[in-house]
Image (cartoon, rainbow, N blue to C red):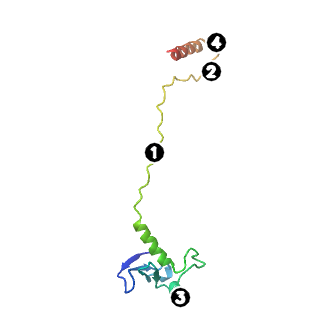
Amino acid sequence: MAIHVGAPSRGFVERYEVDSFDPRRTGTAYVVSFRENGVGECSCPHWKFRRGGPTNQHPELELGQCKHIVAVLESRRREQEPERTPARRTRPRREPELERTPVRREPVTVGDEQFNITRIQALKEEMA
């Protein structure tokens, strides 16, 4: 869908040419014009013969609107919004890991000489 700005005709302040949304009508452009009071008018059949409004296919339309008018209003709204930059996510800081003593992987029997030496070393480190 393309929206082209054109020179407004008498009685209108803005004029846009909007390509048809219907793939069967490729190359067809409708003229959407806005009056000073902000009321939009379109040259599409839906607006000309029914004056716009909700349909079964487009229940979101308000009275006096067609999908071409809504497209122009949405385009104008997007142009007026400031460009948003995505917020940076801060990663939680990881605490520095304390130095750990290596774990003995082989089975140890209580009363083993190596077990007692390791236990005594651990107690000395805790007291220091």
Q: CA distance from mark 3 to mark 1?
A: 55 Å
In terms of depth relative to the viewer, which is nearer, 47 or 122?
47
User: Mark 1–mark 2 contact, CB under 8 Å?
Assistant: no
Closer to the chain start, of discs 1 and 2, is 1
Ranked by sequence position, the earlier of labels 3 and 1 is 3
In this figure, which residue is indicated by the disc labeled 3? Answer: 49
| Residue in the picture at 37% in, 83% down | 8
- Residue 111's tag is 4
Query: Secondary structure under badge 1?
Result: loop
Q: Position of residue 29 (x, y in %)?
A: 43, 82
Query: Marks 2/3: CA distance?
Result: 90 Å
- The circle on residue 9 is none
Is 7 situated left or right of 59 in this image?
left
Mark 1: few/some/many CA within 10 Å (<14, 14-19, 20+): few
* Residue receiving disc 2: 107
* Structural distance between the alpha carbons of marks 4 and 3: 99 Å
- Looking at the rendering, in which quadrant would you find the N terminus? bottom left
Q: Earlier in the sequence, mark 4 or mark 3?
A: 3
| In the foreground, 22 or 63 | 63
Q: Earlier in the sequence, mark 2 or mark 3?
A: 3
* Residues at discs 1 and 4 in contact (Cβ within 8 Å): no
Question: CA–CA distance between discs 2 and 4?
Answer: 12 Å
Disc 3 element: helix
> Relative to 127, is 60 above or below?
below
Which amino acid type corresponds to the residue marked 2 in the rendered image? Pro
In-image side of 112 versus 13 (left or right): right
Mark 2, secondary structure of its residue: loop
